[in-house]
Image (spheres, coloured by chain):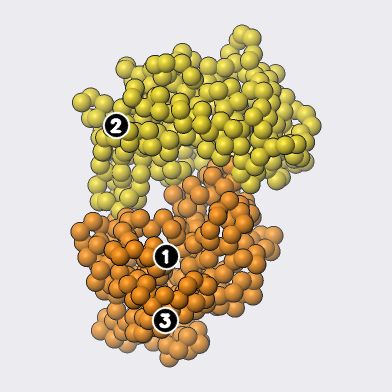
Chain colours: A orange, B yellow
């Protein structure tokens, strides 16, 4: 039986960046990992993984039935794996209808939570969804926010519940079932060595100076953008021009109106303050 | 008792089938109500909900039913108290039949299939990639549907497909896309907006030569595209379409499945069809496949 590490975030917060850093750190190779081969940290809501772990089709189950079986499905995947499993997850930390955590709360699980300033996140989320910034701001406020929740449609991913941006952050940071390590996108950008090293330490991986420097370089924004330009990125939604768009902090100062800034702060101020964004 | 035919087999069942055609003749498979144990001695896990030995398979679904498949000829079903019968039948005709095929030495593929004048064309791919919708589009163009969800490949050579039935299960938005009304259709189970599109025309039960397998893949590309798969890559490609590989492992049939795949590979045309998440029509995808088949 091995453990599961959840790489958790609200979408467009730097989760893929962290995954690519980890893929490079774990590979220890002298060339960058292919961004289209990130099988080391699949999305937790992929139907095929769940179906095979379960033995029945999730497409024959209701969303509630799926949620009641997700924890045991992940436990099985962990039981079968000789090494630690990494999953990307955008779901908030929620409870299923039976009052149990959606994700397994076993002693061997832990999480890294990536947070990003919601002022910048709104711009990135809009570009990712091909929507207006206004729409993205509204989506981040909805307590029933999520994805793949249309009951008339079978998506390749299962239903995900994000809640609002604030509730998402709080759900992960305040749950007491598994240890969680917080990383801020802005710190990954500003002081990468210190920030990524703390993640490596949290995961109990060997602290290797050279590997760390190389993995940070191989997951630098410019490197990822170049890879996407030449080979494309299979995780890019068709509506987004590029997945790796700007990779900056503070873009909101140029892009958001005063009203938009005020609205986001009014809605998410308490959590922004908690994360040091105010 | 209800008698119906699917996968080249005649079933005598306590449950009516919504997918398969009525049949006369001596049954090879019996499906009855009865007590089903909670576990199988000496079994290997085939998933959270199922376990198996080489000759027995148990599926346990909370609040729905427990199912036991024995020796490739006997299925016993014990519904949970108050279970919805449509749900009980849905899992019977899905994973339980899949396990039955394995027990009979028939390779199940996770795919839908249509009949063409030169044999069966199979659509594989992940759940949600559009296998059934594509089969429905070909059905609209006048092709016969041979199978949905599970395609049965018996051990004979050259490889053939044993037709299951002409019904398809489609989600509400796929029905909209195909301009089909859901008004007269029965849901697969009351909780789901997935409907059964009943048979159009007479079902065929005679084996069809296995002509081609196309795998559907959802990508970030802007347009649907088709890429042929050839040589040794076809083995790995076909192996991805095997139904519930964990079943085969628990039944100690995984090496036999792989050997079968390797034997089939040189006989079938293979192709990967990529499509965007949204903003495409299933007709474009069908056109690509029709073009490849005509080449």
Q: Which residue in the structure is indicated by mark 2? A: B231
Q: Which residue is mark 1?
A: A26
- Report the quarter where the N terminus of chain B lies: top right
Residue B80 visible from this viewpoint: yes
Circle 3 packing at 10 Å, graded few (<14), some (14-19), many (20+), is: some
Residue A173 place in picture, x, y as percent: 56, 77
The extreme top residue here reads: B25
Instruction: Indicate the chain on which mark 2 is placed.
Output: B
Question: Closer to us: mark 3 or mark 1?
Answer: 1
Say which of marks 1 and 2 sits in front. Answer: 1
Residue identifier under label 3:
A195
In what element is the residue under mark 1? Answer: helix
Instruction: Tell me the crowding category of disc 2: few under 14, some 14 to 19, or many 20 or more residues within 10 angstroms, Cα based.
Output: few
Left or right of A53? Residue B210 is: left
Q: Is residue B90 visible?
A: no
Seen as rendered, the residue at the extreme bottom is: A278
| Residue A130 spot, x, y in % from top left | 30, 64
Q: Quadrant of residue B113?
A: top left
Q: Are marks 3 and 1 on the same chain?
A: yes
Mark 3 or 1, nearer chain start = 1
Image side of residue B69 versus residue B287, left or right: right
* A10 relative to A160, above or below: below
| Numbered disc 3: secondary structure | helix
**In this orientation, which residue lies closer to the viewer: A268 or B212?**
B212
| Element class at badge 2 | loop
Q: Quadrant of residue A207?
A: bottom left
Taking the view exactly as shown, the residue that stands out farthest to the right is: B35
Q: Residue at x 69, y 37 (%)?
A: B43
The answer for which chain carries disc 1 is: A
The reply to whether label 2 and label 3 mark residues of one chain is no
């Amino acid at each position: 039986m091995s453990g599961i590490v959840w790489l958790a975030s609200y979408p467009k917060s730097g989760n893929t960046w962290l995954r690519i850093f980890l893929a490079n750190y774990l590979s220890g190779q002298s060339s960058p990992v292919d961004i289209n081969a990130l099988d080391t940290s699949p999305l937790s809501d992929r139907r095929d993984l769940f179906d095979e772990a379960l033995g029945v089709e999730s497409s024959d189950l209701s969303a509630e039935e799926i949620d009641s079986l997700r924890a045991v499905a992940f436990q099985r995947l962990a039981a079968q794996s000789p090494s630690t499993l990494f999953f990307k997850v955008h779901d908030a930390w929620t409870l299923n209808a039976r009052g149990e955590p959606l994700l397994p709360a076993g002693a061997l699980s832990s999480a890294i939570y990536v947070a990003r300033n919601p002022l910048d996140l709104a711009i990135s989320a809009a570009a990712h969804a091909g929507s207006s910034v206004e729409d993205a701001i509204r989506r981040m406020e909805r307590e029933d926010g999520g994805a793949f929740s249309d009951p008339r449609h079978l998506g390749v991913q299962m239903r995900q519940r994000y809640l609002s941006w604030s509730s998402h952050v709080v759900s992960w940071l305040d749950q007491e079932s598994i240890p969680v390590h917080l990383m801020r996108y802005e710190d990954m950008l500003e002081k990468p060595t210190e920030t990524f090293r703390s993640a490596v330490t949290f995961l109990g991986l060997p602290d290797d100076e050279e590997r760390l420097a190389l993995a940070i370089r191989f997951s630098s924004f410019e490197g990822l953008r170049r890879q996407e330009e030449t080979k494309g990125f299979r995780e890019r939604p068709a509506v987004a021009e590029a997945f790796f768009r700007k990779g900056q902090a503070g873009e909101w100062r140029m892009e958001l109106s005063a009203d938009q800034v005020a609205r986001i702060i009014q809605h998410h101020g308490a959590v922004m303050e908690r994360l040091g964004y105010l | 008792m209800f008698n119906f035919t699917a996968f080249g087999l005649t079933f005598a069942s306590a449950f009516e089938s919504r997918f398969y055609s009525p049949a006369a003749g001596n049954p090879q498979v019996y499906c009855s109500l009865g007590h089903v144990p909670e576990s199988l001695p000496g079994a290997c896990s085939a998933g959270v909900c199922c376990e198996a030995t080489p000759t027995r398979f148990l599926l346990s679904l909370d609040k729905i039913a427990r199912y036991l498949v024995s020796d490739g000829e006997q299925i016993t079903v014990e519904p949970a108290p108050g279970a919805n019968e449509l749900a009980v039948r849905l899992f019977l005709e899905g994973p339980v039949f899949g396990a039955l095929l394995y027990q009979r030495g028939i390779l199940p593929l996770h795919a839908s299939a249509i009949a063409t004048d030169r044999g069966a064309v199979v659509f594989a791919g992940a759940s949600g990639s559009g296998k059934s919708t594509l089969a429905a589009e070909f059905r609209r163009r006048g092709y016969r549907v041979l199978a949905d969800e599970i395609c049965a490949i018996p051990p004979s050579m050259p490889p053939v497909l044993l037709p299951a039935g002409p019904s398809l299960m489609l989600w509400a938005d796929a029905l909209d896309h195909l301009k089909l009304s859901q008004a007269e259709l029965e849901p697969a189970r009351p909780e789901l907006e997935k409907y059964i599109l009943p048979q159009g025309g007479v079902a065929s039960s005679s084996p069809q030569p296995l002509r081609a397998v196309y795998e559907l893949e959802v990508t970030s590309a802007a347009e649907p595209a088709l890429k042929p798969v050839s040589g040794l890559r076809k083995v790995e490609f076909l192996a991805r379409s095997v139904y519930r590989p964990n079943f085969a492992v628990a039944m100690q049939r995984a090496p036999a499945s792989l050997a079968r795949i390797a034997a089939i590979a040189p006989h079938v045309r293979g192709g990967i069809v990529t499509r965007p998440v949204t903003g495409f029509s299933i007709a474009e995808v069908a056109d690509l496949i029709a073009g490849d088949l005509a080449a």
